[in-house]
Image (tube, rainbow, N blue to C red):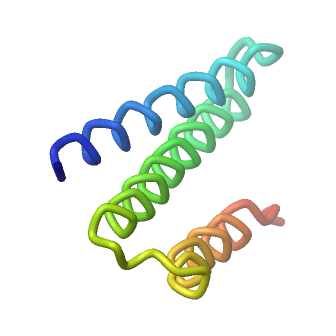
Amino acid sequence: MTLVVAGAAVAVGALVAAALVSAGSRRIRRGARRDAAIARGLRRGAMTGSIVGLVALLRVLDGLTPLTLVFVVAPFVVAELLLSTRRV
């Protein structure tokens, strides 16, 4: 069962990353901004896959409650907020 959860998490992460990379780099042809958009899309896809995998694993193990959901999702949200701040 854990292999199914891991496979689904990897698949969801890859699909989200592909969608975000194609959407984020569509208007930018080359340069540092395109590289940053690609890195941002890959990072967000990996985070989404991790969240889906952890939540699904908790659901399979019968450990998913609203409180554990918050404790699983909150660090990813905080990390994304910190990583997506604009550098000066």
How many marks can you see? 0
**Residue drawn where x is 50% and y is 54% of the image:** 47
Whether residue 21 is situated above or below residue 9 in the rendered picture: above
The residue positioned 66% from the left and 70% from the top of the image is 77
Relative to 83, is 29 above or below? above
The quarter holding residue 79 reads bottom right
- Residue 40 in picture, x, y percent from top left: 62, 44
Location of residue 22 with respect to 33 vertically, above or below? above
Q: Is residue 50 left or right of residue 43?
A: left
Indicate the position of residue 73 as horizontal and vertical percent values. Answer: 58, 71
Q: Quadrant of residue 58?
A: bottom left
Q: Is residue 61 left or right of residue 19?
A: left
Going 50% across and 76% down the picture, which residue do you hit? 72
Q: Position of residue 6 (x, y in %)?
A: 25, 46
User: Residue 11, percent across and down?
Assistant: 38, 31
x 39%, y 57%: residue: 56
